[in-house]
Amino acid sequence: GGPRAKALVGGALLIALVSGGIGGGVGAYLERNGGVGTVELPQAGPEAAERDPDSVAGIAARALPSVVTLHVSGSEAAGTGTGFVLDGRGHILTNNHVVEPAGSGGEITVTFNSGDTAEAEVVGRDSGYDLAVVKVKGVTGLTPMPLGNSDNVRVGDPVVAIGAPFDLAGTVTSGIISAKERPITAGGEEGDGSDISYVDALQTDAPINPGNSGGPLLDARGRAIGINSAIRSADSGSTESDDGQAGSIGLGFAIPINQGKRVAEELINTGKAAHPVIGITLDMNYTGDGARVSAKGGDGGPAVTTGGPGAKAGIKPGDVITAVDGQRVHSGEELIVKTRAHRPGDRLELTLQRDGKETKVSLVLGSSGDD
């Protein structure tokens, strides 16, 4: 019995393998030659292209004709950014850090959603607000972007961002407003700090990447409520204008449109933007809670400008400002951000600590075009 049983097992294996091979070959032959009928997979038929106007697709379809991609080149640098059309006269709003590489003799090319391109010139720019307006010539039929009101925005509101991340023009992303009034500073490569942008930003988790800068953050009705300007990157741990090459980790920041509108109007009308000022020099090295007024001014003059709004309100060197209109400020940067969020002529109430005592002062913000 032993040897014969083994032979049968081997034979059974051989038969199974050969029959598998023949079966596969027969199946392939029949399929190739239509013996069993051709295969056709079920699929949805054509549908109407229209979408609900308040859906992300509907918002994108309405907004894209108003969004442009900017290619900027100068003698030492080049870059890509985004902007959006403000009016029929050719004015386009973007970030200052987008147009900055062009310097005084560089080129700015604007590409519309249609693929048409036009040359643009800077009308005015401001590094402190990180905003700039450029103007295209000889272009008709522009679609201005409707502007919303950033004061109406609430945390959790849905938003849509449009831009050209990594030069991928017309990219649409969506998310929510994650937070409001985030004091952020960006830029700051110049040694004297003259290029630092101070923004009381809207925070969003809509993915924003390098190249999205200057593009619109839209509300659920397709109106611009912010200008996407900076991202927090995981590797640097700092907020940077999104021309660095880090990617989105869901921490994007947009300049509120109410500030953008005011600055854009001033840049168009006068070529520069007025900065609201208190008329004090802050000690930016102060590590305590609040913003401390320096002992002396940066130029060796008084820390509280003679005759300025701060002096009239009775602010003194060494005072620590802890709140603006009842909102806490924890650093000098935060005080500048809160001040910049207002316009010259606005009234502020400051809470001060002096010699261990708390006091409140009221002042009307002054104006400085070159502060």
Image: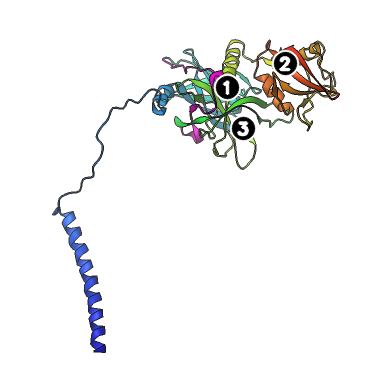
Q: Is residue 143 magenta?
A: yes
Q: Which residue is mark 1?
A: 256
User: Circle 1: is it few (<14), some (14-19), or many (20+) Cα within 10 Å?
Assistant: many
Tell me: residue 147, above or below residue 213: above
Mark 1 to mark 2: distance in Å? 22 Å
Residue 51's label in the rendered image is: none
In the rendered structure, the answer to whether residue 294 lies left or right of residue 204 reads right
How far from the left and from the top, in percent, is residue 329? Answer: 71, 26
Task: Estimate the x, y position of residue 35 in percent, counting from the top left.
Answer: 13, 54
Which quadrant of the rendered structure holds the C terminus?
A: top right
Query: Is there a contact, CB below 8 Å, between mark 3 and mark 1?
Result: no
Query: Callout 3: helix, strand or loop?
Result: loop
Nearest the viewer among 329 and 166 is 329
Left or right placement of residue 153 versus residue 64 in this view: right
The Cα–Cα distance between marks 3 and 1, rounded to whole angstroms, is 31 Å
Circle 3: is it few (<14), some (14-19), or many (20+) Cα within 10 Å? few
- Category of crowding for the residue at label 2, using alpha-carbon neighbours closer than 10 angstroms: few (below 14), some (14–19), many (at least 20): some
Q: Is residue 65 visible?
A: yes
Type of the residue with mark 2: Glu
The residue to which callout 3 is attached is: 76
* Residue nearer the viewer, 171 or 177: 177
Where's the N terminus, which quadrant? Answer: bottom left
Please tell me whether mark 2 sits on a helix, a strand or a loop: strand
Instruction: Identify which residue is drawn at 75% across, 20% down.
Output: 351
Residue 349's label in the rendered image is: 2
Q: Residue at x 72, y 29 (%)?
A: 330
| Quarter of the view holding residue 114 | top left
Magenta-drawn segment: 141-169
Residue found at the far front of this picture: 357
Residue at left offset 62%, top offset 11%: 270
